[in-house]
Amino acid sequence: MTEMALPDCTRTRVAGSCYAIAQDHHRAIVLLLEHRLYASSMSLLRVAFEAYVRGQWLSLCASEAEIKQYIRGWEPPKIDKLLNDVENTPAFIEKVLSRVKSQTWKSMCAFTHTGGLHIQRWNSVAGIEPNYSTEEILEVLAFAEFVGTMSALGVAALADDAALARHILAKVNDRIEQGQPG
């Protein structure tokens, strides 16, 4: 995807940057998991999700003035406003992203900000050490795969490349059929 031709406009460059950052976080999460650095991998889940949501908002909803402000360092609206705006577009009318947020946000924040859930995972009978279940690690991987895939679909939309979107979705379906995450 790094070699794709995209329209040369500010909206595409800004939204595309958010998608690329979300994909970068996805790759970092996978690498961290491979190296058994679970706390750090979990802390990236929220920022990966936010990068993707911001990319969608910038791509589909932001005004030209908001895009220019964003480039200059303006903080976009809070996540709930971004989700509301995105989910008022035809592609997201089913409000899947809001459901994902409602199911995962509290945990993502706890892991990002070293909350109680994270501290619980660093206390075991033996002492202070990582104590994550295999199920939790697989959930982290699956969520990272979801964000990475959605970001790739965002880039395909920026490129107006329906064939690429179908290819990405076919790969996801193949992985699901094989019982692999995302």
Image: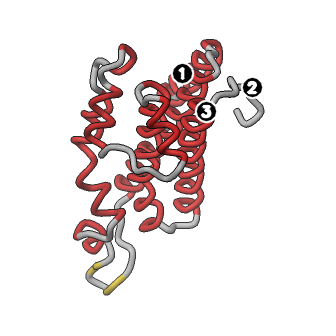
Q: Residues within 10 Å of mark 3 (few under 14, many from 20)?
A: some
Badge 3 vs badge 2, beta-carbon distance below 8 Å? no
Q: Residues within 10 Å of mark 1 (few under 14, many from 20)?
A: some
Q: SS at mark 1?
A: helix
Does residue 13 appear to the left or right of 3 in the view shown? left
Amino acid found under the numbered disc labelled 3? Thr
Amino acid found under the numbered disc labelled 2? Ala
Q: Residue at x 46, y 66 (%)?
A: 40
Alpha carbons under labels 3 and 2: distance apart? 14 Å
Q: Which residue is mark 2?
A: 5
Amino acid found under the numbered disc labelled 1? Leu
Alpha carbons under labels 3 and 1: distance apart? 27 Å
Examine the image and state in which quarter residue 80 appears. top left
Picture layout, residue 151 above or below residue 161: below
Q: Which residue is mark 3?
A: 10
Examine the image and state in which quarter residue 143 appears. top left
Compare marks 3 and 2 and give the one earlier in the sequence: 2
145, 18: nearer the viewer: 18
The spot of residue 10 in percent (x, y) is 61, 33
Q: Can residue 146 be seen by looking at this rendering?
A: no
The spot of residue 60 in percent (x, y) is 45, 24
Q: Which residue is mark 1?
A: 169
Badge 1 vs badge 2, beta-carbon distance below 8 Å? no
149, 57: nearer the viewer: 57
Compare marks 3 and 1 and give the one earlier in the sequence: 3
Image depth: mark 3 or mark 2 in front: 3
The residue lying furthest to the front in this view is 65
Q: Residue at x 41, y 46 (%)?
A: 50
Q: SS at mark 2?
A: loop
Image depth: mark 1 or mark 2 in front: 2
Does residue 137 appear to the left or right of 95 in the view shown? right
The spot of residue 23 in percent (x, y) is 57, 44
